[in-house]
Image: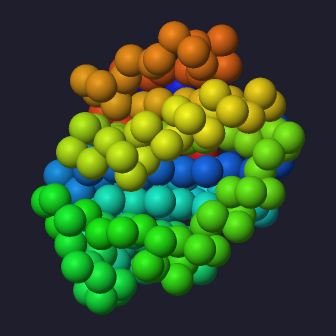
Amino acid sequence: MQENIELISGKIAEAEMVLVGIGEKFDSQKGTSDVREAYEKLLKCLTGKNYFMITVCDDELLYETGFREDRIVRPLAEEESGAQGEKEGCVQCAHLPRWETYMKWLQGTLHRRLLVLELGVGLRYPQVIRFPFEKIVYLNQQAEFIRVHDKLFQLPEQISGRAISISSDVVRLFADAEI
């Protein structure tokens, strides 16, 4: 497992910009000390990097851990947007002020060494992180992609040459890592 963390931290170090997707695997282990430890170690890897995070988790732990609040967007948070929810509580992301900031940041990633890091993202809301992240890597030929999930680690063929799949419990992977 340590070699996977070294691979991830090495790719983060090489990248100019890092896009991180935090999936429901973190939410499913909510309240455990492992989640806090995983976030702390991820933060260490991202220190000094130009990053942006999208999360489907509804806890405040990301903020408490020290990630930059202006670099995190939670597009499923109806209470932040005041928008009417769509199917299963998903909101129109364009109504979120931080979503606009994210879209501007994302425009700046084109033709840059971008690492797209998808951590524990499943199929509950694939239109929020999973499918858009794959498309970003497909369009930006300088982008690389790392997907970490214990069951849904498969990659689309179109990006397979610039993508790495890690079959692992992402929270345990980071919590147990030596960084």
For the question of whether residue 71 can be seen, the reply is no
Q: Is residue 140 left or right of residue 118?
A: right
Q: Place residue 161 in its image quadrant.
A: top right
Q: Place residue 169 in its image quadrant.
A: top left
The relative height of residue 91 versus residue 28 in the rendered view (above or below) is below
Q: Is residue 4 left or right of residue 174?
A: right
Q: Nearer the viewer, residue 136 or 39?
A: 136
Q: Which residue is rendered at x = 77% and y = 27% of the image?
A: 141
The relative height of residue 4 versus residue 48 in the rendered view (above or below) is above
Q: Which residue is rendered at x = 54% and y = 78% of the image?
A: 98
Where's residue 163, x and y in %?
Answer: 60, 21
Where's residue 40, x and y in %?
Answer: 49, 61
Where's residue 150, x and y in %?
Answer: 29, 27
The relative height of residue 176 versus residue 85 in the rendered view (above or below) is above
Q: Is residue 92 left or right of residue 10?
A: left
Q: Which residue is rendered at x = 68% and y = 40% of the image?
A: 115
Where's residue 158, x and y in %?
Answer: 57, 15
Q: Which residue is rendered at x = 30% and y = 88% of the image?
A: 82
Q: Place residue 104 in its image quadrant.
A: bottom right
User: In the current view of this chain or complex, which residue is farthest to the left?
Assistant: 88
Q: Nearer the viewer, residue 71 or 12?
A: 71
Q: Quadrant of the N terminus?
A: top left
Give the number of callouts. 0
Q: Nearer the viewer, residue 64 or 120?
A: 120
For the question of whether residue 158 can be seen, the reply is yes
